[in-house]
Structures are given as structure tokens and as C-alpha cells.
Amino acid sequence: MLVGRVTSVSGWSGQAEYTEKLAVGEFVYYQVNGRKVICQVTSLSVQPYKGFHGTFKILDSTANLPKIWTNLYLLQEKIEGHINIGATEKGEPVKLRVNPFFRHVLIAGKTGRGKTHLQIVIHEEFLKCGIPSIIIDTHGEFTHLNKFNSNAIVVEEMRFADLLAHLKFKKTVVFNVQGLSYSSKTRLCYEILSQLMATKERDYKQAENDVRLLEIPPVIVDIDETEIYAPEHGIKAMNKDCCDTLKAAAEGGGKFGIGLIVNAQRAPGLHYEVRSQCNSAMVFQITDSGSRIVIGQLPYITNFDLKRIKDLPVGQCIITGEMVTHPLHVLVRDIETKRAKNLDFENMLGLQAIPKQPIIMTDEEKGLEETLTTFSKTSQTNEAITFERLQSLFTVRKVPVHGECVVVPERYFKPDWTNTLELQGCKVVHCPGMPGGSVYLIRKNIVKTKAEIQFPTKTSTLIRGDALQQEKKQRK
């Protein structure tokens, strides 16, 4: 769909005039010699007598720059592959290809934000597809995979010959190293990786690089809490061998069919030579400045997505790099197996459960609840919740400091609405201390100007500069 046209280009960014109001962060593309070059809308404004104008950033630094008046089209590509990990904000399924996993993946984010949950989802899909993998389970969180699929084997130790036999039958082997000492964990990881690297390299040599003659299939190695095994600083003698082997696997493992999934709570704590070899990243919420600086140095992360990472809700991540054509905001699906660790600490401590107070709803509130349930279903299929819909359902009040806002009680507000509304140019503020209870305040960031009143909200054609000058003269 045609949405705009380039008016100027400077370096890897440019300006454009648009036929309609896009959301900041949306993706558009232009075509050069039959190739799509993806760009991201970085700002949008309304100018008098000009309509919608804004800036964009070209995400592919190897592409040819667009010429003036090059058409821009809205990017509407589905992510199709074999690994189903969830859906976008608009409810479109996200299915990733398997090949990028063999060029290494970095999973980063704060503790408790969903990193391990995502890893379990990925391995559930591996088991469905018959992709062999090895998991170094540092905290015993993957031990229930064998209850999900009989091709998953959970062990504490295993002979390497037996491990190879399981990999040949495309099984997933989980090494539960919970409770082992620091030196024992790193020694086990070193022995597995070093022998696997040597065996795979020898297998390729004997087959003379003919993949049809290989005895061992491609293998994914998932190392939970990877900064323990390959730290950036303070490498002790006991884990220097493990760190060197991990660096060698990151640099050359992909050539012999070994893909790495590395997991880090603090990206600066993971060795630079390991994280720099990851061609794709799945980033959850990160608030500390050190980790955000390191993530920002990745060549495939944009400034807009770097800002969003700070406020990502639990279970949502941004996928970027070789896995996708453009940075993608994903809501990770629920796991199909039971979590090995899903603890209620209040129950463990013997504290009495706090009874929930029954909510007595009026007929008006019941009708509102049914309407919002319908909106939630449509937001996962065809269209998301909008500011105008909320405005028609809830009261609009002038709130000190925030101005005119739509006031939504917390019990009605859905967590996945925040990012959807922000993409529409809205600001969402959670106010737990408001009179009458906790609420969410939603207001439009863009204030209406005289230019917006004069121009329609959607134009059908773009006006060239010379035609615009003539129109100004006629008006004078």
C-alpha cells in the first residue's frame, strides 16, 4: 500500500511526505532494482498546507539510497517459519526460521521477565520439529521437558558416546547441573562443547563436506546463564578452558552445524567475543544503563527499539537481527508443558492466603465488561484497541499535570494495550494513588493545531512542491 514519498535524503535517514498518519515506529519500504529496502518511521508531524510529514531511518546500510520522490509503501510481511513463539501486537503469528539459530542467538533481559519461558517455548518447538539440541540447565528449569515429549532426556551426567547416539536420533538432552559446584558446571560444559566441536569437525572432514554423508545432524546448544561459563571479567583458571571453548564455538561452530543460544541477565557480563558473534537477539526488559549501552552497540538494534526495551511488560520481547527482516515486538506464547520452577513463596512460608473480595458489578459495569472482552478478542485477530474506542467507553476528565485524559480503572486495563496505544501516539500513565482506586490515564501526545483543522485526517494524493506554490498563490 502506497503511504508516502521521499522528499530528501541525508546519509541513512531522510524526510518524506505521507498520504496518511502513520505511527512512529512503523515500517515502510522502497524498491531499488526489485529489492525491498526497509525503513522505520522515526517522527511524524503536521505542517500547514503540507499535510503529514516525517522522518525515516534506512535499516539496511548496504542498500542504495532512494532518489527524491521515490514511493514509500507500508510493510505488511508475515513472519513465516517452523518455530512458533507467539504473536505480534496485532495478533499476527510469529514463526521463525531455523537457519538463524545456527548463526547464534542472544537472549538478554532482567531476571523474571521471561527469558527462560522463551527458551522453554523454543525447545518445545524443537521437539515438535525433530531438531536435536543440548541444554546446559544451570538452575534445573528444563527438567519437565521429558514429560512434554519422550524425545527429551534429562540427565545429570552421560558418556559422550551415548550423547552422540541420542543426537543421531534427533533427541534433546538436558544436563541438569543444579547443585553442582562452580568448577563442576564449567568443567561439564567444557567437556561437552570441546568433544562436540572436535567430533563435528571430524565428521565434516570424513564426509568431505558432502552433507548427505554426515553421521551427526546439526545441533543447537542452549547454555542457560551463559555469563557463568564465559564471563567478560574475572576469568578464573578453572573456567578459562570453558570460556575459550565457548568463544571457539561462537566463532566457528556454525560452519560445522553447531548453533548457540546464549542467555544473559546482564549483557556486559557475557564475554564480548561470544555476544558479538550472535547474529540475532531476543531482548526483554532492560533498565540498567550498562546493559542498554551494550545492546545498543548491536548493529541490528534501532534507537526507537532501544527506548522501548526499557518499558517492555513481562513476557514481551523485541526480536531483531538475521531472524527477522525488521525489529519485531513479540508477545511470547504460553508454554505447553509445566514449569519446573513456578513457586508460591507465601505458600512455602506457611502464610495464609488472602481471600479475594468479591466484586459487585452494576448492570452498566457488566455491559462494559462484555464490551471489553469483545475488544480483547478482536485485538488478537483483526484490529487492536484504539484511543477512540476507550474514549467512547470511559469518562474523559481533566487531570492536574496530565491534562485531559481518558480514565480507565485498573481492573479493566489489559497489559498488552500499553504498547499498542503508544504506537498510536498516546501516552499511558499508571496512577495507583488516585482517589477511588488505581487507574490508567491515557491521553494523546499530539495536540491539534490550526493546520490539522484545515487539512483532512487522510489525504488521497501527494502534492509536489511546484503545485503547492501555485496553490498558495491562488489562496493569497
Image (cartoon, rainbow, N blue to C red):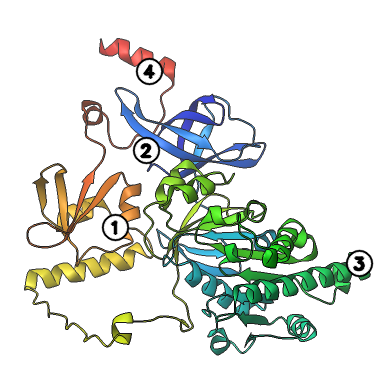
What residue type is disc 3 on?
Lys
Residue 403 in which image quadrant: top left
Q: Foreground mark, 2 or 1?
A: 1
> Label 1 to label 3, Cα distance in Å?
56 Å
Earlier-in-chain disc, 1 versus 4? 1
| Residue 138, percent from left and from top | 57, 75
Position of the C terminus, as image quadrant, is top left
**Residue 315: image tag:** none
Residue carrying label 1: 385
Q: Of the residues tagged 3 and 2, which is closer to the observer?
A: 3
Kindly indicate whether the residue at mark 4 contacts the one at mark 1 (C-beta within 8 angstroms): no
Farthest front residue in view: 237
**Which residue is denoted by mark 4 in the rendering?**
468
The amino acid pointed to by label 4 is Leu
Q: Which residue is mark 3?
A: 205
Give the residue pinned by disc 2: 20
**Nearer the observer, 168 or 237:** 237
